Image (cartoon, rainbow, N blue to C red):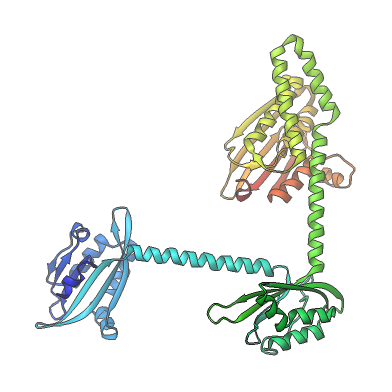
Amino acid sequence: MIAEALFDNYESIYDIDLATKEYRTYYQSEFYQDLKLAKKGKDFFADLEDGIQRIIAEEDQDYVLRMLTPERLIAGLDKEKYYRLVYKIKSGNQKVYHQLRAAYQQTENGLHILMGIRNIDDLIREQMAHQDTVDAMKQKEHNHLEAVLGSAAAYMGANLSQNIVLEQAAGHRDEKGRQIIDLPSVQEIPVYDDMQKWIAEHLVAENQNGYEKISSREYLTNCFSNGDKRASVSFSVFTQGGDVQPCRAVFHLYKERATGDLHVFCVIYDLTEQQQKEKELKRVERELQMSRLRNFNSQMQPHFLYNALGSIQEVILMDPQYASDLLGDFTVHLRSCVRAMANDKPISFAEELNNIKAYINIEKMRLGEKLDVQYDVETTDFNVLPLTIQPLVENAVRHGVHKRGLAGGCVKLRTAEDDTSRIVQVEDNGVGFDVDRTLKMAHEGKMDAAGILNVRFRLEKVMGGSLEIQSEIGKGTVVTVRLPKEKTR
């Protein structure tokens, strides 16, 4: 009767005589019948190994064998009412979670063990998905807290309803590793009112009254009651070196669901550093804008425009179709230059490649057979900043191949990828140059290398990439661009 009552929930139910080790099954589901396991036998534990090897997932076989020895099984049942195992059974190409549950059963013939096997795959996978969700939420909470505290001078958590400090720490350190703000420990001052009074008297240099008012429990409680979940105050503090610097405290208010107590999480920011970061960000933005403008100017130099249009004019009467194609290439190149000046929104490498080919077609009109360009493009399925690869090809043509005179030369464009990066390489067999000397003189303003410097600056600041130059005088140059995959999607 017990077995029949369990039939709906179990795949199989074994009855094992502890004295003789004989066993039989009361029931097997269709799934278990397909496994073709013995329904009865003289020694359950002797037959166990063959069944385990046939149906249990390989990674769980040793575990199940170890846990189902007679000694381990009896010891477990003597200790607890039920003995349980969870493991995976092979089912085609899938692995299905099952649970074994055993219990003693006194019968007329002596002590037996009833052992039920049930499919708990849906339950386990639901629990795993729930745990993944919980882990993701914990990671998100941790990341958010790190982001909040990454530039914080100090922070404090407190229970306002109970007037106690729960946690506090000095967060950010200055460039010399010193704490910007040094607070007493929770053990030293556990009371919230006392902690805020200490901060006001010992740290606050300017706007002490304002800080005391905003940080008070009465003010924050009223804020929350009025629907305001955040309050803030600006003030100045004494640093460890005795200097005065501006700060801002932000008080985040929330109620704890379990108790209904009002909590506050206070973060104190060093405004001096924040202002410096904002200033640096604006400087980088201005420099990026100027870099795009310089890039546009370097591409649209009058001599290039005049030479290209003049050459097309000469071709019109002799070969109108070729002239029309060249005008199309010139338009593609001009449009790319204008777009690059307007913004740094990434484009597909395929678009950049079209611009490169348009530029090469214009140059081949002038250089003819002296310019050989080879493309070894393994992938175009990634994004780049507009007008970052084309200037590298142009440098290879103008400063590498063109300077070889009648001998001409070859430019090779390659793309590839590895586990972390997209790689673009421009190689020429031109005259080569002293890389260190050229870049040093360019930084000093003694030589024009704006193209390379602008490209490197934009790649690093916008896409987190890198640009490496290898060159040997008389043999040629290789420029390698590496772009992180997460930035090129």
Foreground of the two, 192 or 245: 192
Q: Is residue 196 visible?
A: yes
Residue 29 picture location, percent across and down? 19, 62
Residue 485 picture location, percent across and down? 60, 48
User: Would you place residue 294 above or below residue 37 in this image?
Assistant: above
Quadrant location, the N terminus: bottom left
- Furthest toward the left, the residue is 108
Foreground of the two, 91 or 416: 91
**Residue depicted at x 69% and y 35%:** 427
**Residue depicted at x 70% and y 23%:** 328
Residue 12 picture location, percent across and down? 20, 67
User: Would you place residue 66 above or below residue 160 in this image?
Assistant: above
**Residue depicted at x 81% and y 31%:** 300
Foreground of the two, 419 or 297: 297
Which image quarter: residue 452? Answer: top right
User: Would you place residue 469 above or below residue 159 in this image?
Assistant: above
**Residue depicted at x 68% and y 49%:** 463
- Furthest toward the top, the residue is 318
Residue 410 picture location, percent across and down? 70, 28
